[in-house]
């Protein structure tokens, strides 16, 4: 499969890229394309299709160097501002792909998710209730709460509930 065919197939998300990687003599030719996909929300309609994060993670897992894929996504997530719209879907994609790496034991992916949680929590505490900023931050924060609960289970859920309870007492939500 040519690089352009691979890129198009990756955007479709139907699994032909996985077959191409499994049958390729040299998978290195696809490394940059998979990184390109990890840095973008490829779904045509993410509200209906969901994210392609798991699919891209599985493609990236064929390579021995997780940091090659994790570090750029972490950097992009750290720079990301809460802007809503299509950006929310990109935020979800970044969180979900980092979740996949974190579930596989990648410490940098796990740390990035927790750092973003802390940053959003503190931003939400400073935002004026009912403001556009508050609404946008809250959407990202809710996504991250779900991701971290998925990653660490009921213990994290209890911790998040405690954080949110503290915020409710201060009327930040």
Image (cartoon, helix red, strand yellow):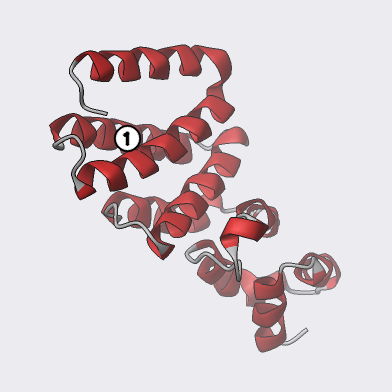
The residue shown at (66%, 59%) is: 49
Residue 130: x and y in percent read: 21, 39
Report the residue marked by disc 1.
115
The residue shown at (18%, 17%) is: 170
The residue shown at (83%, 65%) is: 22
The vertical placement of 108 against 81, above or below, is above
Residue 149: x and y in percent read: 52, 25
The vertical placement of 52 against 143, above or below, is below
Q: Quadrant of residue 163?
A: top left
The vertical placement of 86 against 117, above or below, is below
Between 77 and 32, the residue placed more toward the observer is: 77
Quarter of the image for the N terminus: give it. Answer: bottom right
The vertical placement of 76 against 133, above or below, is below
The residue shown at (57%, 53%) is: 65
The answer to whether 62 appears left or right of 149 in the picture is right
The answer to whether 149 appears left or right of 15 in the picture is left
Q: Quadrant of residue 167?
A: top left
Tag 1 secondary structure: helix
Between 23 and 91, the residue placed more toward the observer is: 91
Between 62 and 158, the residue placed more toward the observer is: 158
Residue 165: x and y in percent read: 32, 14
Quarter of the image for the C terminus: give it. Answer: top left
Residue 96: x and y in percent read: 54, 46
The crowd level at tag 1 (other Cα within 10 Å; few <14, some 14-19, many 20+) is few
């Amino acid at each position: 499969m040519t690089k352009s065919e691979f890129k198009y197939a990756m955007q479709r998300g139907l699994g032909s890229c996985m077959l191409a990687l499994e049958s390729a003599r040299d998978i290195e030719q696809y490394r940059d394309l998979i990184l390109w996909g990890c840095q973008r929300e490829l779904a045509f309609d993410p509200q209906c299709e969901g994210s392609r994060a798991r699919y891209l993670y599985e493609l990236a897992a064929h390579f021995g160097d997780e940091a090659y894929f994790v570090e750029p996504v972490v950097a992009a997530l750290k720079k990301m501002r809460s802007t809503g719209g299509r950006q929310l879907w990109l935020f979800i994609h970044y969180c979900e792909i980092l979740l996949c790496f974190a579930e596989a034991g990648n410490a940098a992916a796990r740390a990035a998710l927790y750092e973003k949680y802390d940053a959003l929590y503190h931003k939400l505490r400073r935002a004026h209730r009912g403001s556009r900023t508050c609404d946008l931050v809250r959407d990202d924060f809710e996504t991250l709460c779900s991701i971290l609960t998925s990653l660490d289970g009921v213990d994290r859920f209890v911790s998040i509930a405690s954080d949110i309870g503290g915020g409710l007492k201060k009327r930040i939500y």
